[in-house]
Amino acid sequence: MKTDILNRLKYSQGKDAEHASIYDWRIALSLVLRDQMVETWFRSTKEAYAASPKRVYYLSMEFLIGRLIEDMISNLGLEDAARAAIEELGQDYDMIVHDEPDAALGNGGLGRLAACFMDSLATLGIPAFGYGIRYEHGLFEQSFAQGQQVEKPETWLTQRHAWEFERPESQYTIGFGGHVDHHEGKAYWHPSEVVMATAYDTPVVGWKGTWGNTLRLWSAEPSKDFDLVSFNRGDYLAAGRSEALARTISRVLYPDDTTESGKELRLKQEYFFTAASLMDLMRRYLQDHDDIRALPDYVAIQLNDTHPAIAGPELVRLLVDDHALAMDDAIELARRCLSYTNHTLLPEALERWSEHLMGRILPRHLEIIRAIEHAHQSEYPDSPRILEHGDVRMGELAFVMAHKVNGVSALHTELVKETVFADLHRIHPTRIINQTNGITPRRWLYGCNPALRNVINDQIGDGWVADLDQLSVLKDKRGDAAFVEAFADAKRTNKVTLSNWIGDTMGVSLDPDAMFDVQIKRIHEYKRQLMNLLETVALWNDMRDNPNADWTPRVKIFGGKAAPGYFVAKDIIRLINDVAGVINADEVTGDMLKIVYPPNYNVTMAERLIPAADLSEQISTAGKEASGTGNMKFALNGALTIGTLDGANVEIREHVGSENFFLFGLTAQEVMERRTHQGFARAAIEASPRLQRVLGQIAEGRFAPQDTSRYHGLVGMLYDHDYFLVTCDFDSYFETQRRADIAYRDPKTWAAMAIANTAGMGWFSSDRTIQGYARDIWNAHSLMNPKLEKSA
Ligand code: F58
């Protein structure tokens, strides 16, 4: 490996060892690893071509992959070899690994799920492609100025991305706008604007390097060389205009976590990657098959939310306009290929495009959407409309064009049936099914938590990495004092490492024996970071009232970004930072209570924080969090959850045991019921002296003495329209936190509860989730090892 690295340094980076920077070493090491991956990848690709199986195409606007280097090293089983080689070359291995920028091509859970799924598809040996966009700028970089979020463009691609291969030969022309002619029953779309989609492939190799799939991301490029005539005339701006327009399409990831701004560019991005992906999979299909009607036997297309929902009309367009199928046959054939995952019930996040915009950007697609609507209405006259009030409703379109629609946790799926798609569910009662989310144990335990991984391996070997149910054996080891101690030591080691990092980067010193209480996720009102903060202030008040009592020391850790246009979320960030400033400087509470909010939360930061957490905050208003996947990562790493009966919390609690989970708060039913009570928030505040005191302090500027009215709006909102019921759940949350304090004071009991969490989390492997999709939705199979297809 040493020789390989030196060769790569020389021939790919043009450097010798004396002059190489950390960056050069990292690229050299990455290319050596990539070479090894290519072997698996070629073999898998050849085997797939030979077997001509059904392939899975996972279409997603987002793939939040983070860093790849450690993942690749561990999947290839090269940890020791890579470290030894780098150290023998006189370099610092950890520095090299940490030099890689995060590929932040996603906002949050939806994008990270897609990345976990890619890992599981490869580990299971299911032939699959991930299709998405190669954004030049991923999710913005967050910093804080006087406590307020500041956004800067993210620049991962300014450095070479070592893992990908550019595929200039895999280029497709994508049209927009123009008009449609109809001749003798045939439609001809004449776009007024075209861009090229160029493929960039990243091999995705699964555990032990046995199978490799492809993540194919599309980059937008101008269709022709820039305008030389204008250039020669001296009109340089005109010469670059079409080029700039084209490149804009893959320039930035939309940072919007909730609201869909009705932006033309967003629709263009969606169509751009969906159309390129469908043309690509059709080309692959037609290489081996003549009969277009057999497409559903070989192609399963999963739509990750509605962002690629234009795939329905696009596939119908290809079948009708290019392959001369009748419209109704094409719709039916397309439906047998397509399936759709819903990730949210929040009405503001359900995509709709105005018919006007759709007709202007995609005129042929609007005609086809009308035909789909017509066909569906003729069969089911009472069906809800796809086209409504001048809008195209993408959820309804995705539903109607899918043979299966899935929710992402048991509770969410039931709510999907009862709310957003209640009417469509009545018409198609078997279409909606559940596939509870999962996480890859490779990254979220094996990779991010070497201390715990080693303790587990010492007990049961490493079979659990590809078969997470094996962890259940650990449950019986809760009486084994040596194991309990080793488990607790691993947590303590991780807490020390995290404390050092926080000390170095933020200048706050932490007591590693305090309870580390962590809430990391996008900042959103329904996720209720505000309730966590109010509880922190209430605890601080109690501590100051009675400083000599026997308190359980706490470190409250927050992490997460707010969408740039989401002003309430940004106020919440500022308040957390303001409160942290006051509490961290308080000598009365000192080490008993600290708040830290490291900026720019991302996948790499999650990998640092999760292994060091004692308590996982999963406190969304019941009925609002579709599933959550952070909740799974914490529990797998031996944190206890304080949470509501929301999303996958419900199933986590069942698997780890209700006695090992701190449950509080209203249920989804109770939430809906409570909202109907006039003045419910005021009533809740009046009934809680503790909450009243905290709100009073915030309102009177206790945490912003220079600007005492800063949080009037936020506090006023809690009194008057507390839509997410922070006030109603506050007391029950506070009391449950105090129960957690008491439990934490008995380290052995706490460790046993933590072990029960790790041991109970086997079912939440994304391998199980993918086996569920393969069986219930795709009818796709592993080419690698039929034994792995045990029933999920
Ligand atoms: C998340 N959605 C859900 N959306 O909120 C979470 O409960 C679930 O676990 C996860 O999906 C995976 O199923 C989510 O992350 C987005 O980020 C969208 C990005 C594009 C705009 C709309 C929100």
Image (cartoon, rainbow, N blue to C red):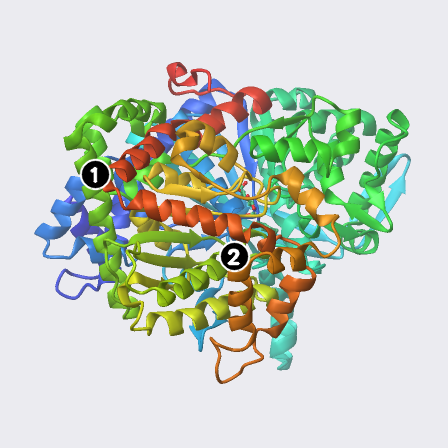
Question: Relative to 659, does residue 98 appear above or below in the rendering?
Answer: below
Please name the residue shown 64% across and 23% down the image: 296
Is 543 situated left or right of 360 in this image?
Answer: left
Q: Residue furthest bottom?
A: 706
Please provide percent x and percent y for residue 50: 45, 20
Badge 1 local density, few (<14 within 10 Å), some, or many (20+)? Answer: some
* Whether residue 768 can be seen here: yes
Query: Residue 299 or 597: which is nearer the viewer?
Result: 597
Q: Specify the quadrant of the image occupied by residue 141.
A: bottom left
**What number is the disc on residue 698?**
none
The residue type indicated by label 1 comes to: Leu
User: Residue at 27% across / 43% down in the picture?
Assistant: 449
Q: Which residue is mark 2?
A: 531
Q: Position of residue 101 (x, y in %)?
A: 36, 58
Identify the residue position indicated by label 1 in the image: 78
Three-letter code, disc 2? Met
Mark 1 or mark 2, earlier in chain: 1
Frontmost residue, 535 versus 306: 535
Q: Looking at the image, do the residues carrying marks 1 and 2 touch, with CB atoms under 8 Å apart?
A: no
